[in-house]
Image: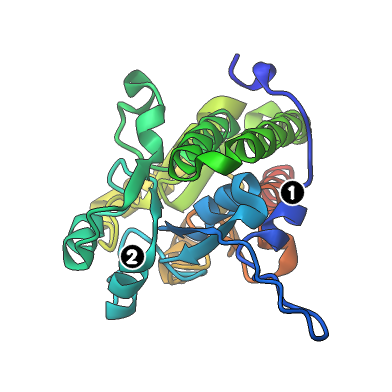
Amino acid sequence: MILDKMTHATALAATLALAGCASAGSGGSTAQAPERVSVACTISTLCSLVAGVGGADVSIIDIVPVGVSPETYEPTPSDVVAISKAEVLVENGSGLELWMQKLLADADDKGLVTVVLSDGIPASDRATGNPHLWLDPAYASIYVDEIDAALSHADPPHAASYRSRAAAEKLKIVALDRWIRNEIATIPRERRAMICFHDAWYYFDRRYGIRDVGAIEQSPGQEPSPGYFARLSSQARLYHVNAVFGEPQFSPKLADALASNAGLAIVSQLYDDTLGSTPALSTYDGMMRYDVRTIAEALSR
């Protein structure tokens, strides 16, 4: 298994705190801060993984703001400027950032090193076309390898540091995976079924044995038809779904309606495409642990 091959450990939160932070001089010192690689990431969740690998050797530009959906995002002129100044671009791919090609054309940065993280996942594993691969920790570990390779290519003098931090990140993901399995095991088997606002949790559900009953929003930005909504309500009753999970980047209106119609509890905030704005939700590891606790509590009721 991919996750069983990872070695060495460190704290992602510590490296994230270092990433992108300029070295400030103290007193009358004239020493200059070392140059860092400028890395643009499409979403904050990926930025967290980049920060873990890059540490103090990178400065990070987050394109899609925290709390905003990347699937319906409209790039701004400031994004064009940011991309034009970046040396490395990290994107998910697999249809998550449909706006990226236009942004790259507008920036016209021919020297940009681009890494499409989902390209590192075997094609058979991503055949569904669902882009939310990082919610399976095994795939997040592959993302870490892709980030390590991209940063090492862009900045060979720090390749050993990137490799070391990547190994540490991967072992932390091993620990996360084990912890998630233990948490999911606390949910009665007959209650391991989820309905979410959009279909972000397919790979997570597949890995941990949770029935993916469906999602309210079938296509980004499009409301479900009345017929589909009725069928989803019926499926919720058939599979004894306890709760419907909303997400902070989307309006709660439809999730509230489904919960009322099918007699479900409403859980308003799962994080996936975006990190949260609090320190506890500011890393991939923190986001995943919060989400899993939230899922386990809601499904165990």
The residue tagged 1 is 297
Is residue 182 shown left or right of residue 75?
right
Q: Can residue 242 be seen by looking at this rendering?
A: yes
The residue depicted at 62 percent of the width and 33 percent of the height is: 163
Task: Check disc 2 and report its element: helix, strand or loop.
Answer: helix
- Label 2 is placed on what type of residue? Ile
Question: Which comes sooner in the sequence, label 2 or label 1?
Answer: 2
> Residue 181: percent from the left, percent from the top?
72, 29
Is residue 229 shown left or right of residue 7?
left
The residue depicted at 44 percent of the width and 38 percent of the height is: 153
As displayed, is residue 36 above or below residue 79? above
> Residue 46: percent from the left, percent from the top?
51, 51
The residue depicted at 59 percent of the width and 18 percent of the height is: 2
10 Å crowding of disc 2: few (<14), some (14-19), many (20+):
many
As displayed, is residue 39 above or below residue 26? above
10 Å crowding of disc 1: few (<14), some (14-19), many (20+):
some
66, 157: nearer the viewer: 157
The residue depicted at 73 percent of the width and 66 percent of the height is: 279
The residue tagged 2 is 83
Is residue 189 shown left or right of residue 41?
right
Q: How many marks?
A: 2
> Residue 78: percent from the left, percent from the top?
33, 78
Q: Give residue 52's mark.
A: none
- Label 1 is placed on what type of residue? Glu
Pointer 2 with pointer 1, Cβ within 8 A: no
170, 219: nearer the viewer: 170
> Residue 49: percent from the left, percent from the top?
58, 47
Task: Check disc 1 and report its element: helix, strand or loop.
Answer: helix
Q: Can residue 225 be seen by looking at this rendering?
A: no
The Cα–Cα distance between marks 2 and 1, rounded to whole angstroms, is 41 Å
In the rendered image, the residue lying farthest to the bottom is 28
